Image (tube, helix red, strand yellow):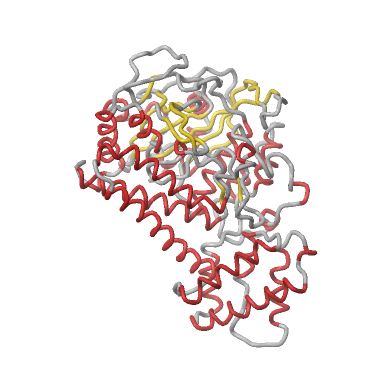
Amino acid sequence: MNSRTLLTRLDDLVFDNRFIRELPGDPETANYRRQVAGACYSRVLPTQVSAPQLVAYSKEVAELLDLSPELCASDDFFQVFAGNRLVQGMEPYAMCYGGHQFGYWAGQLGDGRAINLGEVANRRGERWTLQLKGAGATPYSRNADGLAVLRSSIREFLCSEAMHHLGVPTTRALSVVLTGEAVIRDMFYNGNPRAEPGAVVCRVAPSFTRFGNFQILAARGEIDLLRRFVDYTIRIDFPHLGEPSPAVYADWFLEVCRRTAGMIVHWQRVGFVHGVMNTDNMSILGLTIDYGPYGWLENYDPHWTPNTTDAEERRYRFGQQPQIGYWNLGQLANALYPLFGEAEPLQAGLKAYAETFDQGWQQTMVGKLGLVAYRPETDDDLVAELFALLQRAETDMTLFFRRLAGLTIATEHEGWETEMTALLQDSYYLPEQLTPEYRERLSHWLRHYRERLRRDGLADAERRSRMNAVNPKYVLRNYLAQLAIDKAEQGDFAMVDELLDLLRRPYDEQPGKDHCAAKRPDWARSRPGCSMLSCSS
């Protein structure tokens, strides 16, 4: 699409809004906290704000919506995506859903600080739901205000786009807009509230339907509505499966399981920790959704979680994300069982999840290690020993794999192992942990790895290219996001745009940007926002 066909007025967006046309809504129109039964959504208007100001927008997402750069720089853009004005065709609503939070059924949850503006049909025939996060209270806000602060909005905006460019299935983000309002937040829920700048982020996805949308209907015994919602989801989001029927239900659940597995394989590949994998934060499309207390695994630690709420139990730690995905799908299966009447199709889906994850992880390691194919008889032990080494000494996961691509097998010379260990040196946070015993163990692994590569016979250049295509050089390191937030809170948004641009090409060498690929500085080891966060972060 060229610039002449892009929209210059937001009122020219085309909304189809099938969600509210085809599913039943809450008959109560007043906006107060309540239980909402027999409905999939409640109509609600965003809260008006005093002084919208653009922080940043994604040109790629704007292009998905056919929006011109001039339009995205206009005052009308700020007003609409702060929630102050509805364009023609917008019919805002908040969705009703439930969920398991930290393993326990929480009942009704719903869009407590998210308001869907409607579903846009772009000129390529794609449907994109526009959703404002932080635009005010809804009937599902419980005791909260429905607002968001600048720091959490920047984190969601940057990470949504970073994940997309990394190749991870994700919701997208169009914009971050300051509201001009102060929002009171207690960042760590420890009795230290403070006023922070309020902001609204516009999220974009084909659908924001979650596991919890189906769970709440099953929990309330609203089986006819459950069936209606499933049929709608298949017709709109999975049309390739055909018209809903018992056989299509089975195919649909199988695909949901496989998509979820694929998403989590990607999380493990790049070192992403979601932080709050409640069932209401699981997308039915297998997209990463709800960027709250997420974090990037810097030193490899499968037990790490960035979420202060989960600091004791560590239910959602990095190494357990695959198992939690399986557990969450089990809860979805329980909710869907009344439509199936038998367990076998649901069990087949769960089995497919495990198989898809295992196969996907093997292929991931083929890419990360530059192999031709995975050979379990040798590679199971090779991979297990590698991750044991990464955990034994505090090792930057992103840097290690990127440096590992520099290994050479073409020539044999004395001192090769010393050179290779030196190449990996800057991946380690605590040099004193590199004891003679550790160095010998690492050298032993490198010898076996080199021999494994020789059996494949790939040239160094080809192997390096394959590895660098799946091992990013640049990720949204926790401290980089916090530095951008610090500056933005002082009115300087330049670093947000700089990071957005950097993360568009995470696998490429970018001259002058090596400082953004460096491991976490010591000052960020325990600083709030760089190490641990809460659900309000």
Horizontal side of 337 relative to 367 (left or right) equals: left
Vertical arrangement, residue 470 with respect to residue 338, above or below: below
| Quadrant (top left, top right, bottom left, bottom right) of the C terminus | top right
Image coordinates of residue 337 in percent, x first then y, are 29, 40
Where does residue 115 sit, x and y in percent of width and height? Answer: 45, 26
Q: Give me the residue at 70% from left, 71% from top.
A: 423
Image height of 155 relative to 48, above or below: below
Q: Residue furthest top?
A: 30
Relative side of 155 to 528, left or right: left
Q: Position of residue 359 (x, y in %)?
A: 41, 63
Say if 408 sits above or below 485 in the image: below
- Based on the displayed image, in which of its 4 quarters is residue 375 positioned? bottom left
Tell me which corner region of the image, top left, top right, bottom left or bottom right, holds residue 526: top right
- Front residue of this view, candidates 270 and 512: 270
To which quarter of the image does residue 408 belong? bottom right
**Left or right of residue 421: residue 371:** left
